Amino acid sequence: MGEDTCLIPKCEGLTPLEQALSSPNFHYYEHMRALMCSYLPKEAVALIDRTFFVADFAHREQKRASGEPYIIHPIAVATVIVQMHLDVESVQAALLHDVVEDTFITSDMLEQEFGPTVNEIVDGVTKLDKLRFHDYKEAQMENFRKMILAMTKDIRVILIKLADRTHNMRTLGALRPDKRVRIAKETLDVFVPIANRLGISDIRAELEELCMASIYPMRYRVLKAAVTRARNNRKEVVSSIQEAIKARLKEAKIEGRVLGREKRIFSIYKKMVHKELQFREIMDVYGFRIILKDVDTCYRVLGQMHNLFKPRPNGFKDYIAIPKLNGYQSLHTSLIGPHGVPIEIQIRTELMDQMAARGVAAHWAYKENGSKAVSTASQKNAQDWIKNLIDLQQSAGSSLEFVEDVKTDLFPDSIFVFTPDGMIYNLPKGATPVDFAYALHTDIGNHCIGARVNHHAFPLSRSLISGQTVEIITSPTASPNAIWLSTVVTSRARSSIRQYLKGLRSQECQLIGRRLLQNALRSQKLDNLSEETIQSILVNFKEPDLNALYSDIAMGNILTVAVAKFLDPNTHNHHELPIKGTGGLPFIFAQCCMPIPGDEIIAHIAQGRGIVIHTKNCKNLRQSDLGPGKSLNVSWNYTITANMDFKTGLQIEIENRQGIVSEISNAIDLASSRIESINSDLKDEKTFRIELVIAVRDRLHLASVIKHLRKVPNILSIHRRK
């Protein structure tokens, strides 16, 4: 049987279980098999037995970095899938997810043995190591794009990919420290946000914990020990509050489960860093979860809890009526318990609790008698997001552009707004009426000409805030404006506008581009430009002819101000602005390098953000960002900046002692500056790193601030943030 490595062994005369039992690695498979026997029928288990045998045969010569048989990894990935109670094809694909890439088995062999669906899922999960790229970042972007697109074909691809990454993170110990940190950071940047967006909180939370343990091992150990001590010390308080809640439910004749809610170490660490809270302040809040049978009972229990304990002002959030973007639903309320103890209670139904843990994965759970899954908020949101990803891919110009658009969706600080008839829409923070119009329907966005917010006229480029009622005004003759690309924030709006502009007839596109360029040139007539001038423009912007230039302007690929500046470097210098050379267009200062007067600067034309002012040596600017049509040569208008303050960042390392932060603040005051924001982070047991944003007039003023700070004892180092 093992002699011919070109074929999958048939093993005729043996049952699938007997085939599995013949494997020397069957003992690794036993636990997973017991789990799936608890929810899958016998014929499904038999299919998976055969799949295990084939996967084990294919990987028989391979070892993991730890020296163990390689089959342990596919079994562990499939076990995560089984714990979600996913269907047979998901479990099979999980066991086989590495065979095509790492063994003699081909896609055709896989399809012949297990069918097209399993083969397609495996193909979606398979790594892309054989592709060639110009650099590592491009490879990462392309891998991410392929993974997202594979997910749009079948959501089970990403579920297996998440399970695969979970087991890889659990077994990072066998790798070098630098490789562990790199994989953990990639996981935190890519896989954790995807798990969160799909509502799979079990996997998200585990990945966050594992990432922190790899990136900050010392902090993780210290916090874990502190959490264990705190939990042991507060058992009595938790028990008494829990009993009080149970007694109140019993008195009201309401059936439900009451659970103490454990805080995770990564969540505690994140709050300590971002909210600048001490460990004690976080652990002093007692969390509970009440699980009930239906939504009506949830609201009844909320009333009971507000009668039992005093509610805190602004401490109530209704995620049942307004679910989170990933479909999460629950009632959250903050209360003041006995002896002034702060309490947080989550109230939800059994189904909502399952969805909070598994999210979209619950849709793929195996159903008895073929019954369909209940349509949930998680599933609907995931389907909407995936449909949006398909539209995005069609309109994106490159992998990098596609990934940036996806990341906008993965990290949304959401707001919610209303239609005039009371429907609620979730949008990312910074969304404009145009974003809202496209959220309603693509046709509404394409024909939008204006908006009313709370019954008043409202600019299409201004950001909305939560709670507003938005009415979109449309006209059948209206069409999207290329300038909208610089103000919209949702990927759906951006992709729809791009799609429309790409779909315009070539002649219309050229007319729009020509009109935009003529408006930018103002007094200078396009028709009066010499042939030599036109040729120099085309060479500089790498365009074959004027029509192609006009089309790129209409598509938003080239800003008209860049062409105008090329023709006349002194064009439209608005001397009332602190920056010369932007052509009067609005600009923002980059938050990465925070330029101040005295720095050498350059304006980068960022897609979707407009003009961004960077320092010339900013590490975030690549050579490709500085080409024609992508940057402008600008300078400081010192007559204006003399009376202005600019924000810049300082990084200070200190030996911690009582009152040092107060002394730092006093030193900055003495230097006639002020602190705009402050963040601190523990570097090691004795050293803190403080990140400051301060207001200064120019580089000389900044030097004066640093000179004053150097006089403060116990400051180890101080430098400007790059």
Image: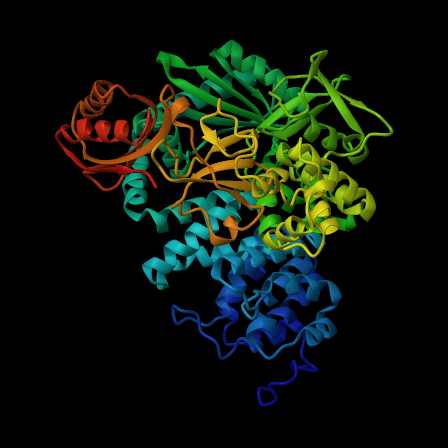
Quarter of the image that includes the C terminus: top left
At which x and y percent is residue 610? 57, 36
Q: Name the residue furthest bottom.
A: 3
Q: Residue at x 55, y 53 (%)?
A: 162
Q: Is residue 183 left or right of residue 465?
A: left
Viewer-side residue, 223 vs 88: 223
Q: Residue at x 51, y 60 (%)?
A: 76
Image vertical order of residue 442 relative to residue 172, above or below: above
At which x and y percent is residue 601? 41, 39
Q: Is residue 295 left or right of residue 261?
A: right
Q: Is residue 667 visible?
A: yes
Viewer-side residue, 168 vs 529: 529
Q: Quadrant of residue 381?
A: top right
At which x and y percent is residue 441? 78, 33
Image vertical order of residue 654 relative to residue 640, above or below: below
At which x and y percent is residue 530? 68, 47
Q: Residue at x 66, y 57 (%)?
A: 150
Viewer-side residue, 456 vs 45: 456
Q: Quadrant of residue 296?
A: top right
Viewer-side residue, 202 vs 138: 138
Quarter of the image that includes the N terminus: bottom right
Q: Is residue 210 left or right of residue 686?
A: right
Q: Is residue 496 visible?
A: no
